[in-house]
């Protein structure tokens, strides 16, 4: 029976149907013999990490998939700060931010280019001009995490319960920064909203007048003269993953937010880099996963490639990436499939539509369990539609973790209390009965 699991997370693989694919999704239209083989030898179903129809960002979906409740979620800003190795005290607030081209219109800021092209040298010059600011007892620092992206770290009497300024779409006005409705009487939230607003206005003035932008304007390029901000966060107390689920976890992923989430829940991380070759990337990660199984019993193997392809809003690009990933999985999955102690899970965190205005969408994603003892159903294709007739049915939220414990023969018989905490796994780390 399986004792360990490898969860292959194909980020954003779920999609919608397109006429160009004869009304199939990119995953249905793609040639995926390896994924289809796993589906044919396993149990299949549809998965959503929360409520069907909810469009989840990766960080929420992963947090829920790893068996947590959103009440313990610290905000993406805090996760990316952890992922970037930024020292974050429990009282600090981390706000996701990046440079953008702004213009003034009717007393508002409007986004000209949300993600401008700019050289590393130019970015360094901009950061030097605006990396520190103090207002209303709040210290604000911009810390670069890569390219135009960074964290605005707020220290002092601060609160994370503020709205975003980033409208996500070029041509739209920036959003007013205010406290959340439930925190409208919270002085720290109001103070942070005002301090951040002042910082963004000051930043705009400083950047418009800095040498980098004078040079850009001279060359006919747009000034990169402001920040957009979103998803403020602050650390919370959270029960570590191995204590919550009795599994020693490793995450193999490239993005800051996944590293940060793993750090937050006490899961070990292996940070990898994305190349131009998703086939090789996923094969390398699966080889690393196989080698790690002596030390871990839950290995998360992540690829962002399908999500990124979908964000180009080109269904063909997504289909092509999916076919590359299938070839890459085929190169490395053999030893994992042959090992009777390994349970393989293939799924995604959310759907990412290759057309339309949505960033992510709320449809379910496919879920396959492959390993010894798994009920075999009649599904023979790994895609959003075929899996829906499978033996796993419709799986939601932390049911995924319960199913994993179940198939690893680690599910506790409900009602058994071998430890003072009613943990879902068995056996618990209990105290031996001592005679004295
Ligand atoms: Zn995602």
Image: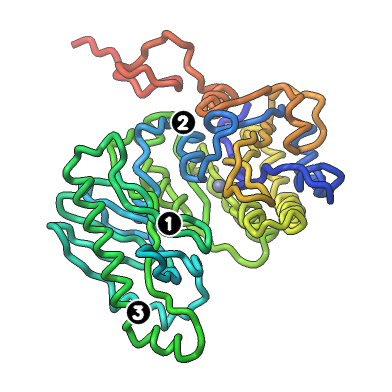
The vertical placement of 360 against 72, above or below, is: below
Give the secondary structure at mark 2.
loop
Local packing at callout 1 (Cα closer than 10 Å; few below 14, some 14-19, many 20+) is: many
**Residue highlighted by disc 2:** 67
Label at residue 292: none
Q: Nearer the viewer, residue 344 or 45?
A: 45
The vertical placement of 105 against 6, above or below, is: below
The vertical placement of 203 against 385, above or below, is: below
Q: Can residue 234 be seen at all in this image of the molecule?
A: no
The Cα–Cα distance between marks 2 and 3, rounded to whole angstroms, is 46 Å
Disc 3 under 8 Å from ligand 1? The reply is no
Foreground disc of the pair 2, 3: 3
Residue 230 at x, y percent in the picture: 39, 53
- Identify which residue is drawn at 76% across, 38% down: 382
Instruction: In the displayed orientation, state which residue is furthest to the right.
Output: 22
The Cα–Cα distance between marks 3 and 1, rounded to whole angstroms, is 19 Å
- Please report whichever mark, 3 or 1, sits nearer to the chain's N-terminal start: 1
Q: Nearer the viewer, residue 288 or 189?
A: 189
- Please report whichever mark, 2 or 1, sits nearer to the chain's N-terminal start: 2
Q: Is residue 327 left or right of residue 243?
A: right
Quarter of the rendering containing residue 2: top right
Instruction: In the displayed orientation, state which residue is furthest to the left.
Output: 137
**Residue highlighted by disc 1:** 166
- Please report whichever mark, 2 or 3, sits nearer to the chain's N-terminal start: 2
Quarter of the rendering containing residue 52: top right
- Identify which residue is drawn at 69% across, 45% down: 335
Give the secondary structure at mark 3.
helix
Quarter of the image that includes the N terminus: top right
Label at residue 208: 3
């Amino acid at each position: 029976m399986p004792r360990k699991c490898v969860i292959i997370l194909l980020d954003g693989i779920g999609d919608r149907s397109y006429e160009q694919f004869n009304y199939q999704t990119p995953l249905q239209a793609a040639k995926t013999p390896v994924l289809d083989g796993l589906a044919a030898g396993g149990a299949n179903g549809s998965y959503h990490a929360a409520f069907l129809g909810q469009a989840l960002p990766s960080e929420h979906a992963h947090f829920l998939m790893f068996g947590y409740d959103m009440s313990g979620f610290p905000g993406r800003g805090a996760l990316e700060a952890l992922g970037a190795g930024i020292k974050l005290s429990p009282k600090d607030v981390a706000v996701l931010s990046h440079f953008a081209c702004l213009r003034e219109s009717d007393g508002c800021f409007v986004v000209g280019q949300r993600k401008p092209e700019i050289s590393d040298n130019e970015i360094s010059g901009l950061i030097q001009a605006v990396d520190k600011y103090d207002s209303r007892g709040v210290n604000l620092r911009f810390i670069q995490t890569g390219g135009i992206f960074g964290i605005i770290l707020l220290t002092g009497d601060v609160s994370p319960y503020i709205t975003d300024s980033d409208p996500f779409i070029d041509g739209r006005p920036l959003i007013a920064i205010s406290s959340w409705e439930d925190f409208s009487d919270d002085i720290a939230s109001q103070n942070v909203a005002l301090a951040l607003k002042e910082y963004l206005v000051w930043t705009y003035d400083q950047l418009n007048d800095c040498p980098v932008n004078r040079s850009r304007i001279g060359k006919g390029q747009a000034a990169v003269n402001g920040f957009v901000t979103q998803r403020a966060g602050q650390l919370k107390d959270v029960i570590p993953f191995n204590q919550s689920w009795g599994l020693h976890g490793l995450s193999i992923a490239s993005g800051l937010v996944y590293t940060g989430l793993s750090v937050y829940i006490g899961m070990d991380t292996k940070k990898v880099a994305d190349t131009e070759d998703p086939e090789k990337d996923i094969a390398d990660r699966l080889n690393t996963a196989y080698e790690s199984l002596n030390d871990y019993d839950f290995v998360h193997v992540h690829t962002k490639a399908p999500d990124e392809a979908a964000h180009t809003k080109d269904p063909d690009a997504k289909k092509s990436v999916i076919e590359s990933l299938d070839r890459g999985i085929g190169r490395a999955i053999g030893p994992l499939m042959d090992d009777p102690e390994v349970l393989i899970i293939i799924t995604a965190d959310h759907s990412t539509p290759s057309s339309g205005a949505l960033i992510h969408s709320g449809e379910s994603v496919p879920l396959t369990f492959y390993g010894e003892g798994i009920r075999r159903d009649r599904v023979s294709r790994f895609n959003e539609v075929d899996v829906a007739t499978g033996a796993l049915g419709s799986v939601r939220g932390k049911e995924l973790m319960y199913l994993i414990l179940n198939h690893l023969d680690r599910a506790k018989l409900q009602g058994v209390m071998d430890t003072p905490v009613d943990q879902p796994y068995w056996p618990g780390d209990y105290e031996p009965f001592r005679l004295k």
